């Protein structure tokens, strides 16, 4: 059996924060997960199909919800399921053709679950504090740029 290997060199804290941000956007706005992202250690961005830019109140609420999930210190676990089973529950359109028959699912407590091949923290408190540094809206694409800070900062 083939499986997705953890070959993305994403910064684990930032990558786990991206999963939480995606689920927060889904829950708050009913939009899909980001269709494009760039995850780096210093700052990251996620792009969403959206109809407008965010208000300051929405930005504050997203930050609050993401940080609330982080502070719950949820376990981050991986599970492996058949591609057929994963296809009934998850959107597999981003999987490479080489993904194979077994799909890795990353679960963040009971908050989020999705197929992923990247590196992650083992508990959400390892992420630090999430902060949106800017947003922009252009051609039906909402871009959210964010950073992580140590709890002491």
Image (spheres, rainbow, N blue to C red):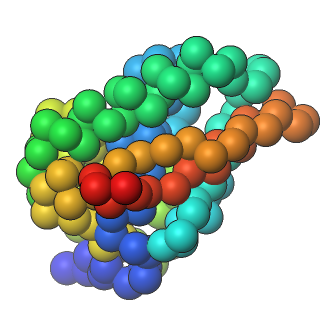
Q: Is residue 147 left or right of residue 87?
A: right
Name the image quarter holding residue 58. Answer: top right
Name the image quarter holding residue 74. Answer: top left
Figure disc tally: 0
Q: Is residue 109 above or below residue 6?
A: above
Which of the image's four quarters has the C terminus? bottom left
Which of the image's four quarters has the N terminus? bottom left
Q: Is residue 87 visible?
A: no
Q: Is residue 69 visible?
A: yes
Q: Is residue 66 above or below residue 145?
A: above
Q: Is residue 85 above or below residue 60?
A: below
Of the pair 47 and 13, the residue shown nearer to us:
13
Of the pair 35 and 72, the residue shown nearer to us:
72
Of the pair 75 and 43, the residue shown nearer to us:
43
Q: Is residue 30 left or right of residue 75?
A: right
Q: Is residue 80 left or right of residue 48?
A: left
Identify the residue at horizontal 58%, vertical 15% (top origin): 57
* Residue 119 position in % (x across, y down): 31, 72
Of the pair 21 and 98, the residue shown nearer to us:
21
* Residue 91 position in % (x across, y down): 44, 43
Identify the residue at horizontal 24%, vertical 43% (top origin): 70
Name the image quarter holding residue 116. Answer: bottom left
Q: Residue furthest right?
A: 139
Identify the residue at horizontal 57%, vertical 26% (top origin): 59
Identify the residue at horizontal 14%, vertical 37% (top origin): 72
* Residue 106 position in % (x across, y down): 24, 55
């Amino acid at each position: 059996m083939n499986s997705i290997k953890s070959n993305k060199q994403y910064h684990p804290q930032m990558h786990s924060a991206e999963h939480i941000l995606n689920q927060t956007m889904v829950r708050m706005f009913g939009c899909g997960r980001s269709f494009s992202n760039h995850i780096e250690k210093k700052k990251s961005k996620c792009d969403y199909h959206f109809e407008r830019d965010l208000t300051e109140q929405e930005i504050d609420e997203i930050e609050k919800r993401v940080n609330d999930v982080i502070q719950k210190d949820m376990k981050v676990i991986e599970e492996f399921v058949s591609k057929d089973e994963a296809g009934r529950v998850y959107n597999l359109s981003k999987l490479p053709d080489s993904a194979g028959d077994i799909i890795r699912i990353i679960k963040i407590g009971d908050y989020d679950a999705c197929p992923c091949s990247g590196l992650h923290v083992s508990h959400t408190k390892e992420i630090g504090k999430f902060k949106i540094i800017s947003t922009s809206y252009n051609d039906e694409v909402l871009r959210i740029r964010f950073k992580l800070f140590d709890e002491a900062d």
